[in-house]
Image: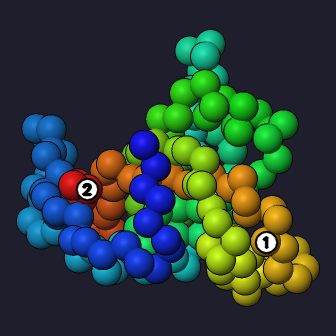
Amino acid sequence: MTDTTPIGERGGQDPVAQPLPMPPGYGEQQTTLAWPTVRAKLVEAKQYWIAVDNGDRNPHVVPLDGMWIDDRWYHGGSPQTLHRRLVAKNPAVTMHLPHPWEVVIVQGTVSTAGIDDEQAARLATTFAEKYPEYGPPNAELWRDGHVLIPRKVLAWSDYPRDATRFVFG
């Protein structure tokens, strides 16, 4: 079930940081990253890659624009796109940032955001500020937007020393 609490009003705790277990021979995990640092990377990213189940034993991977707001990832796209059609069949996805050394991987569930007029306006304004190349804000595009609700985030910047798993409650 989607959290329908208005954007910006979601209180709550930061996710729990845990050392990411290392297989033998991978080195030693020594510290965990701070969630605000990882959150900032998610907020600042211009591109996000998602992998969805293609139903034929191969993942469908595609880069998307989006916004990390209140520890949720909002993205749009036409309902005719393959990723939107696949998510409608199986909402479990993995999203990651494109940087190969500053790794952030988000695992969770995508659903229709259930966005009201005020939320759609806020998302449209935020999107237009982040991606001015797409033109002025358009709240209509966000009424059927999707939201990724994270279950787990994996992140590191100095593997394996700071490899961290964040678990959402």
Quarter containing the N terminus: top left
* Label 2, residues with CA under 10 Å away: few <14, some 14-19, many ≥20: some
The mark total stands at: 2
Q: Nearer the viewer, residue 77 or 163?
A: 77
**Amino acid type, label 2:** Phe
Amino acid type at circle 1 is: Ala
Quarter residue 141 falls in = bottom right
Residue 97 position, x and y percent, is 53, 60
Would you name the residue on which mark 1 appears? 139
Task: Tell me the number on the disc at residue 80.
Answer: none
Of residue 44 and residue 112, the one placed in the foreground of this image is 112
Element carrying mark 2: loop
Q: Earlier in the sequence, mark 2 or mark 1?
A: 1
Residue 91 position within the rendered picture, expressed as x and y whole percent measured from the top left: 52, 35
Quick one: 100 or 49, which is closer to the camera? 49
Location of residue 94 with respect to 66 vertically, above or below: above
Residue at coordinates 17% horizontally, 51% vertically from top-left? Answer: 20
Name the front one of labels 2 and 1: 1
Residue contact between numbered discs 2 and 1, judged by CB atoms under 8 Å: no
Q: How is the image coloured?
A: rainbow
